[in-house]
Amino acid sequence: MLAFVTFALIVLFFTVLVLIGKTNELSEDIAGKGMNYDAKSKWNGYLLLGFVIAFFISIVYQVKLLAPIMIPKSASYHGEKTDNLFYVTLFFMTIVFILTQFALFYFAYRYNQSKNKKAYFYSHNNQLEVIWTVIPAIVLAVLVVMGMRVWFGIFNVEGRDKNPLVVEVTAKQFQWMARYPGADGKFGHRILDTAHITPTNELGIDWTDPNSHDDFWSDKLVFIKDKPVLVKLGALDVIHSFYLPHFRVKMDCVPGIPTQFYFTPKYTTEEMRDYLKTLPWWNTINPETGEPRWKTFKYELACTEICGRSHYGMQKEVVVVKDQAEYDEWMKKQTPIYVAPKSESASVDTAAAPATAATDSTGKDAAKTGKPVAALVKK
Amino acid sequence: MSAQTTTTADVHGHVDTDHIHGHEHHHEPTWLETYVFSTDHKTIAKQFLITGMFWGIVGGLLSVLFRLQLGWPNDTFPFLESLLGKWAEGGKISNEFYLAMVTMHGTILVFFVLTGGLSGTFANLLIPYQIGARDMASGFINMLSYWFFFAASVVLFISFFLQTGPASGGWTAYPPLNGLRDIAINKGSGLGFDMWALAMTFFIVSSLLGGLNYVATILNLRTKGMSMMKLPLTIWAFMFTAILGILSFPALLAGVALLEFDRLLGTSFYLNMIVVNGHLLDYRGGSPILFQHLFWFLGHPEVYIIILPAMGIVSEVLSVHSRKPIFGYRAMVVSIMAIVVISFLVWAHHMFVTGLNPNLAAVFVLFTLLIAVPSAIKVFNWIGTIWKGSVRLSVPMMFAIGFVSMFISGGLTGLMLGNSPIDIQLHDTYFVVAHFHIVMGVAAFFGMFAGVYHWFPRFYGRFMNDTLGYIHFYVTLIGGYAIFFPMHFMTGLPRRYYTFANFETFNNFNFLTQFISIAAIVVFIAQLIFVVNFFYSIFNGRKVDVERTEDGHTYGNPWEGTTLEWTAPIERIHGNWAGEIPSVYRWPYDYSVNDKPYISQNTPLAPGEVEHT
């Protein structure tokens, strides 16, 4: 019944519209101005002019409303440069945007046929074409040069710290496995063959390598302020993408092809909270936690390459500590995989959305993972 | 083959070599030949258009459904269960089907609506009409092109009803997500993806058959006097679109074929060292990135395959309704050529964060930003065309203006995305979604609508209703911006997320996602107004003012255009022109010149008149 009523209402809606349209058309025909677009051009001219003005005002309003909610300032050094480049581009864009949009709609209004009866035959002007080819080309060349300076700064291997904090992050459906090298700063070797890669040792860590004995899984990514980080990335099953929105870091994790990203965190988690405390929106109360938003602020790791049903659940917390001492203290509390391996899956899975816990299959995926047990480890 | 005597073969292989003298005793086509297996470019154009409209509704509806999930992630909609069954148990779309809908939405709109529906419709309608040909070079191949498109449509549509659902690994079909035929990894990577691949194969065949025909027709069947520099910009756009498609679609076909080898035959083109549930699979030595190169070698030209026909249509519509020549005709032609050439050199800008060699990325940044130059030239020329015109703000003109607005808004953000360091943050986020939907989604639709409203009289001898047209325009313009403009502020929020609830960082935009969803629903309804208007006007639209001449045919030129399609009888006749095909003496943009509102291309130069060059 409800479906029928809905359907009837929809049909009625479109019938009324069509009748209105047809009535207008017939009355125009009766008035003998069927194909005369003078009147229509006049009021549509005003509407287009009104549109472009309203459009500009709405953009100002959107900036006011939405900019404070956006992901805050960069928490890494290179991110400040990419953000800066974003704003430089935005500056040029805004000029072009305003000029061209306004010209477009204003000309449509100003020269509509009710105001301008006779068009001016003007087919080309090569000088103008040259001008509006050369100016954009120069601006774009500037942007390319600026962009490439930043780009090669980020990927300049020679200029890097020889002794960064190295973290190995391996992605799989639907979790991040973060392996730290432990106190010796060296990862145990991995041997990628069927003998070493097993359900309890998905990375194929070679336990005969003593370097592996203090490697540990971490349930969060911990970085040190001002200490360069080299994240070594990989994936087991499908492509994932390692994304740290606050640090402007993104790199795909590709099965069979190692990738990496090198960057330096600038603000600790605490410092970022202190900064956000100064911004009005971050002082509003988050209804879900009942706290001001800055208080629960945290850096997060997300996946940005479609990787299957629980793509949206690949979250991991990221913490930036203030110095090596704090890091060492944290490290001491971690248990090596070799000694008492906790399941890497214990660290991860948050995919179950609040309302969908029952239907989401991610929980199952996590349970399936199996726990690497020391006794099974090949010595 | 000369322009005067075209050769067409009907479905029975019956060859009719001479239309001019063959009319009186022409074999009377059956209903099936006229409306179904037709070789007539006008009918094929309608077939493409109506199939495209069907897919447009399906693709749009999918987006409305997944916008329900995005706007109200914590609510349930019982009617969804009636509609989708097990995919929306309890009235909530499952996360698996959400991805399937996103995937199919992309595939349908990019390929089936904005390539098949747009290029297929207008290239078919306008190429023979505007160059002065009786039909395509091969009517039979043209017919095959449509029916391969139809076959692709059928296969893709059936895949919705599979037990494991349609393809759900993204319209880009990246392996290994789509390369492992394992529904435990991704339900849509089962039979759903095989059907996607089959549908795409048919689609590519259709596109190649169509494209070869377009190029052959434009190069060979132009009427007397129609030199290349007298072609309307629509034709230039269709020709270069076809060339782009011919050169790039085979790369996708090869890519998909190799992907199916991996899936069905156990090869390792794209797979290497895959570990599933702790077991190392037997794939060695492939590269998932190779597929991305093959995919985007088509995928990027594809966005120009979508936008170039829209640009051509808009150039024509802006000029006709401004009563002014297109500004900088030669610059427009050269910029189309530049776009086509450069569009082959930008594909890896979709891959800046795949681990691509940073030096290689630099090359792609350069070309990507370089392609903005010809695009900018086009925008300036469009605005120059309106300047000091006598602008008739009819419905097609409104859509053409809307196209330019959308193209500016969406094109500018390309400068950010194309610059690799900025792209690190923006890649695969809502900023990208905003960018490409505005610049090649909404804009291409505006171009398509401009074309449909403008050439509807050419199709049916009637107009579409103006009132409904204006409503359609304003709701789509305002709604289109309402949907996609705020997404720029969701910079950094990953796309293809089912919900943001798991992230503190992304979970602040709930009111905005709701607003966007409401806008999307409104815009969808406005498109239905267009569909209703279209079908209503076929039968009841205002008739074009016509003049009956002594040859028994009626002629009308409703928008006072100069191009040849308006010199042909308004009613649909086989071979387009009743008598001889008109010869061409002048360029297509003689508007408001010599104290005349317009001078048709087939009007000889007046004594002493200098040809426009």
Image (cartoon, rainbow, N blue to C red):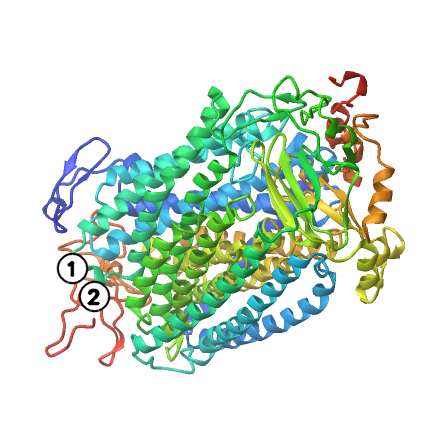
Q: Are marks 2 and 1 on the same chain?
A: yes
Density class for disc 1 (Cα within 10 Å; few <14, some 14-19, many ≥20) is many
**Any part of residue A132 in sight:** yes
Label 2 sits on a secondary structure element that is loop
Q: Tag on residue B582?
A: 1
The chain to which mark 1 is attached is: B
Q: Nearer the viewer, residue B481 or B455?
A: B481
> Counting other residues with Cα less than 10 Å from the Cα at mark 2, is it few (<14), some (14-19), or many (20 or more)?
many
Nearer to us in this view, B214 or B6: B214
> In the image, what residue type sits under mark 2?
Gln
Mark 2 vs mark 1: which is more N-terminal? Answer: 1
User: Could you tell me if the residues under marks 2 and 1 are in contact, i.e. CB atoms within 8 Å?
Assistant: yes
Distance from the alpha carbon under mark 2 to that under mark 1:
9 Å
Q: In the rendered view, would you say B580 is above or below B120?
A: below
Numbered disc 1: secondary structure:
loop
Residue position marked by numbered label 2 in the rendering: B601
Q: Position of residue A209 (x, y in %)?
A: 71, 25
Residue B33, position as x, y percentages in the image = 28, 36
Amino acid type of the residue that numbered disc 1 sits on in the rendered structure: Pro
Q: Quadrant of residue A210?
A: top right
Locate residue A165, reporting x and y percent.
Answer: 72, 45
Asked if one can make out residue B471 in the rendered structure from this viewpoint, the answer is no
